[in-house]
Amino acid sequence: MKNKIFNILTEIRPEFDFSANVNFIEEGMLDSFDVVTLVTELDNQFGISIDGMDILAENFSSVENIMSLLNKNGIVS
Amino acid sequence: MIPVNTIETFQNQIRKVKQYKKGFLTNLFLDIPKHELWMKLGLMKYEESGETMFFCRVNQGFKNLFFVSTTVYNLKNDFERFLSDKEDELFVIDVIGKDVIAVKEIFLNKGFFQYSALVRMSRIVQDTYDDTPNSLCLSYADKEKSNGVHKLLLKYFDVYAEQLPLIDEIYNLANKNGIIIYSEDSKNIQGFLIYELIGQTSYLRYWFVHPDHREKKIGSALLRMFFKESQNTKRQLFWVIESNENAIKRYEHFGFKKEILFDYIFINKNIRYEE
């Protein structure tokens, strides 16, 4: 699951290193347009529909947070 | 239409669309500080139509229209229903993305005209350092100068195409040293540049030289200071009118490249953007 998330993030923003231990939003690596793109990709690639209440920047600020969101939607590693 | 007073209200409406589990099609990208300000000022409303939520931001004599929907097919049908009792209203819609032909067609087929198109340009910057001194005419805007900048934005920028910031947004930017002004006499503003630094990314929002003061290298002085302020970022970007080939060539000279990301602006009035 982690690798898939990395691939999606790198596809969206190839110029940034998503393995770094930083907040992707605060570091300007993902903007609001990227978050929407990310939600769509995660929905499509994992066969889920992320709840509208969960579409908050903080849920996409790290690979771990994204994994937690996927766990919440029934996707486990 | 129903007022949107909180971010939670807004998110609840998105939740309703996501619960259909049929897709996620939107031109609304949540920017909490900006959208909370709109809500606080009573500028945001919503209306549900089928599987689509339409959000309006009340502007100067028109409304910016945003949608959150499931599919192109549903957006098309829901938009028709949404418009049916709003014949006298003026709407501006931004359609943003890489491959949005089908969405554009929805609005073109319902009496909307393409007013303008913007393309995003960016450059990836590595290890730059510039210690050349700035022009003495450059400084950061304080509150008083922010008022002057806001007046110039309203006078010289296009209200339909540019999504002009509210004065409170301008003050917020000035507080973060995000407004550089060029002033030869510390009173009048001959030019300004507004930008935001977010971590590794620097956004150039607005760049302006007063028409009476062009060809004096004011624009390049402002841009050089923007580059200096952004030298610890990795990516710098901005939107430019797609048909402005002169501007695009100038930016390409600085190493910027066009992305495959466009912002098409539609309006239900037969007018076109004029530079």
Image (tube, coloured by chain):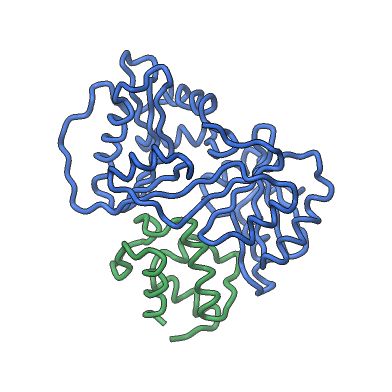
Chain colours: A green, B blue
Figure quadrant of residue B72: bottom right
In the displayed orientation, state which residue is furthest to the right. B85
Expressed as whole percent of the image width and height from the top left, the position of residue B36 reads 57, 46
| Between B7 and B148, the one nearer to me in the picture | B148
B141 on left or right of B25: left
Q: Residue at x 62, y 56 (%)?
A: B8
Expressed as whole percent of the image width and height from the top left, the position of residue B111 reads 74, 47
Total numbered labels: 0
Q: Residue at x 69, y 57 (%)?
A: B106
Q: Please determine whether, in this image, residue B217 is positioned above or below residue B106.
A: above
In the displayed orientation, state which residue is furthest to the bottom. A77
Expressed as whole percent of the image width and height from the top left, the position of residue B152 reads 48, 24
Q: Please determine whether, in this image, residue B216 is positioned above or below residue B259.
A: above
Q: Is residue B199 visible?
A: no
Figure quadrant of residue A6: bottom left
Q: Residue at x 39, y 37 (%)?
A: B246
| Between B43 and B105, the one nearer to me in the picture | B105
